[in-house]
Image: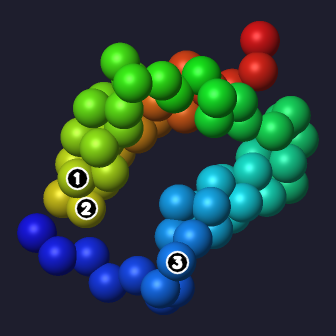
Amino acid sequence: MLFIHPFREGNGRTARILANLMVRKAGFSPLEFEKIGKKELEHYVVAVQKSAAKNYEPMIDLIGMILPS
C-alpha cells in the first residue's frame, strides 16, 4: 500500500502536531506520544494501515491509550 505524504521529512511530526491541535480544540490535554514504545509501535502501524481501509477502531484505541490520565 502506498501513501502520499505532503512533506519530504517530518510526516510523523506533522501528524502529531495536527493530532494535538485537534484534541486541544476539543478541550483535551496534549496527547502523550511518548507512551508509544517499541511494544506499541506495531499496534500504531496496524492502526494507520486499517485507517486507510476506513477501519478506525484500532486508531481510536491507540488515541485512547495516549490521552493523558
Q: In which quarter of the image is residue 19?
A: bottom right
Q: Which of marks 3 and 1 is nearer the N terminus?
A: 3
Q: Nearer the viewer, mark 2 or mark 3?
A: 3
Which labelled disc corresponds to residue 49?
Answer: 1
Residue positioned 47% across, 85% down in the render: 8
Residue 54, position as x, y percentages in the image: 25, 57
* Disc 2/disc 3 C-alpha distance (Å): 21 Å
Q: Which of marks 3 and 1 is in front?
A: 3
Residue 36, position as x, y percentages in the image: 51, 27
Residue 6 drawn above or below residue 15:
below
Q: Which of 46 and 11 is in front in this view?
A: 11
Crowd rating for badge 3 (residues with CA inside 10 Å; few <14, some 14–19, many 20+): few
State the residue position of label 2: 52
Residue positioned 41% across, 82% down in the render: 5
State the residue position of label 3: 9
Can you name the residue that lies furthest to the top here? 69
Amino acid type, callout 1: Gln
* Disc 2/disc 1 C-alpha distance (Å): 5 Å
Describe residue 68's horizontal placement relative to residue 51 as left or right: right
* Disc 3/disc 1 C-alpha distance (Å): 20 Å
Q: Which of marks 2 and 3 is nearer the N terminus?
A: 3
**Tag 1 secondary structure:** helix
**Tag 3 secondary structure:** loop
Q: In which quarter of the image is residue 4?
A: bottom left
For the N terminus, the quadrant is bottom left
